[in-house]
Image (cartoon, grey):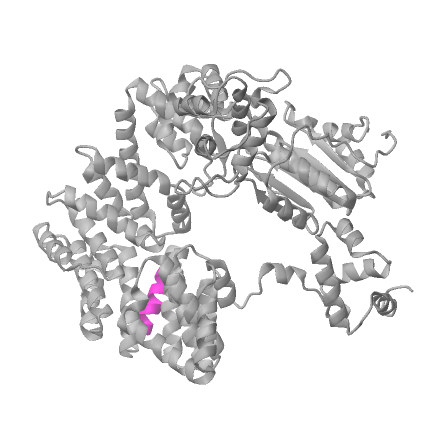
Amino acid sequence: MGARSRRSAGNLPAELTSFVGRRHELGEAKRLLTTARLVTLTGAGGVGKTRLALRIAADVRRAFPDGVWLVELADLGDPHLVPITVATVFGLRGTSDQATGLAEHLEDKQLLLVLDNCEHVANECAMLVAKLLAVSGGLRVLATSRHTLHVEGEHILPVEPLPIPPADDPGAGPVEAVTLFTDRAAAVSPGFELTPDNRATVVRICRRLEGIPLAIELAAVRLRVLSADQLLERLDDRLGLLASRPLAAQPRRRTLEAAIDWSFELCTPGEQRLWAQASVFPGGFDLDAAEQVCASGEADSGSALDVVTGLVDKSVLSRRNGTFGRHAWYRMLEAVRDYGGAKLAAEGDEAGVRARQAEYYVDLARRYRAEGFGSRQSEWLGRLRREHANLRTVLDHCLSAPGRASQALDIAASLWNFWYGGGLVPEGCGYLRRGLDLCGDRTLTRARALYAMAFLAIQTGAPHAELLAELAELAEEFDDERLRAGHAECAGMATFFTGDLTGGAELLERALAGYRTAGDALLVFDTLILLAAARFFLGDPRGAAAAEEALALADRHEARWSRGYALWAVAIHRWRAGAPREAADLLHEAIALRLPDRTLLAFLVEARAWCHSAEGAHDRVARLLGGAGAVWRLSGARVGEMSPYQGVDEQCAALARKALGDEPFDAAFAEAAALGLDEIIRYALREKPAAEAAGKAAEPGGLTRRQREIAELVARGMSNKEIAATLVLSGRTVEGHVENILVRLGLTSRTQVASWLVGQPGRPA
């Protein structure tokens, strides 16, 4: 390989227009580049990833002695050409192993490599980046892509559309989307400025364009010939807008609407049909949904795959990694989906597509109910969370379309424990209530919905007596053992929660027997958990056996989500038996699963407080009770407020308050109650915040790795400003580090730092 002479400045292009906003992303990217070897900016097309990457690279240029180098990959057709394309930027010419030669060239360099538009050659980029990072300790990589590269050590920085003023306050202060539009409009229409008279119109334009920078920039160009009001009027049409483009611009630089229209014209009839029909999926879809819902006339499974592939190739669909069986997931930008929706309505086939979609989700919900207590339990939960927007759309459609309410009732009833575990209890109750009001026929579907509604209502303290009465009638009418057991379970749970522990346990025992007879493993498990809890508060040792049976059942079915509840049930009985440390270990294991079930998390954090109370760790008791209360509020359930649980909480709180005093207890409780879910989990697990853990190191003098690095630069005689430029930090951050270094080392001057370093083991004078 032969190399051209080194060009220390790199090859960044000059900016032709002003850069607007992105202060947070700029700061976060600079921070990441101080520690991470690979940072990937991810986001949809037109969102501004490339422009942001170029600004980041320009801002950090001085930190890289060997320059900042941009490699544009958008036009690369052959993925195998990635190494040679990168090598060419450095002036390297071909060998039989271009990647190896490139690695040798970069081995001793300190530079930033910017790889732009990696999505269509992601695998090749990932392999090359991994190889280069392995051999060059001074290399940093900043990539832009519509999805991650999946390289070890990769840090992801999502790039979203620019902020737009809230709909309820269009007069809010300067917002980035409005600023961008105003700046670009002034460039093409001298004298244009944002005024009280046109502000509302400009805000509506930016909202209509969803804050997408590409769309905003190219819409603003039309102010050469249109007024802002005329532009807004055409935007509201969403069709045939802004078809022209600057001669120097690439095809993707057309306005959003013109690009959509142009893309539609380039699609085959099958692709156009699927585009229109897939618009009914606001949350995205997988291939199975496309095959079942989007009928293409002649389509079989193979042709559906071909059509989806064609739409992905044309950037109509974006592909994302799936959560259910690793199925690929496809989405459209909202504007693209709206366009498809207009086409679907014009074709007159919307009713048929909606009907197939409803059938598809009835089947999906029933499959979840049948398979949801097994090894794929967590996958199912992830799938439903991803399908949430689609489920809402289908449920709302069925509840508003004549003759389809029973399908909504079927779906909502099958998802009862998704509503419960997903922190969606009020939402689930809302759909069930609407469905029950619309479907008065005495059917098995109605009976299942009554059970689901009663279960959720009891969790929230809502009225449920009429629901249970009708459920009991239908159980006898259909002579259905599972429905009888369901009635006993809900009645037992309600009785237990109101404080009648003995009566509640008796009803739950009856429910357990009925579910065993019906052979419903999930509901056997659920009732074992409730029975274990009721017997716990009764002081009945048989509760421990119920908890252990539930844990064994979850393990036998490999039901990871359910296992979290079983660990909780076993733990509280171990605590009751005088083994708080053993109980705490079980609770730690359950919290560490980091399941998305907020109700379960509330139970677990609450029980951790009980364990710490037995150990006399009263400050942690106060904080964990505060954190548990916050999680209960997020879950939508109110079990923690019911008398048996509340009684134990109050006992622990009273002990902690007596030990700490009222003010310290209240302060600790309130501080934890204000934390986010992740922070509560980390506190419950005794984990330090990730940033703090990453910054700690076994350095002499108690310095962190970052402080040791800054101390070395101070010893070289560098000023705070020079250190900030070298490490890509703010001057204020460096100043704070230097002050902390002096305090930790007991020094008073920067020159003393150099003397201290000379005396450290393993460091030459």
**Picture coordinates of residue 7 (x, y %)?**
84, 33
Q: Is residue 267 among what the camera can see?
A: yes
Name the main secondary structure of what is drawn in magenta.
helix
Asked if residue 110 lies left or right of residue 398, the reply is right
Residue furthest bottom as drawn: 658
Looking at the figure, which quarter contains the N terminus?
Answer: top right
Q: Where on the picture, by quarter, is residue 543? A: bottom left
Q: Position of residue 389 (x, y in %)?
A: 36, 40
Q: Is residue 101 above or below residue 23?
A: above
Residue 385 x %, y %? 39, 46
Where on the picture, by quarter, is residue 515? bottom left
Left or right of 322? Residue 76 is: right
Residue extent of the magenta highlight: 544-553
Question: Viewer-proximal residue, 183 or 380?
Answer: 183
In the image, residue 503 sits, relative to residue 519, either above or below, namely: below
Residue 377 screen position, x and y as percent: 38, 51
- Observer-nearest residue: 347 or 528? 347
The answer to if 36 sits in the magenta stretch is: no
Residue at the image point whose x is 22% and y is 73% from the top: 499
> Does residue 152 appear in this view?
no
> 492 or 632, which is in the foreground?
632
441 over 90 or under it: above or below: below
Instruction: Using the image as rendered, state which of residue 16 and residue 763 is in the foreground.
Output: 16
Magenta highlight on residue 552: yes
At a point 44% along the width and 71% down the height, the residue shown is 669
Q: How many marks?
A: 0
Q: Quadrant of the C terminus?
A: bottom right
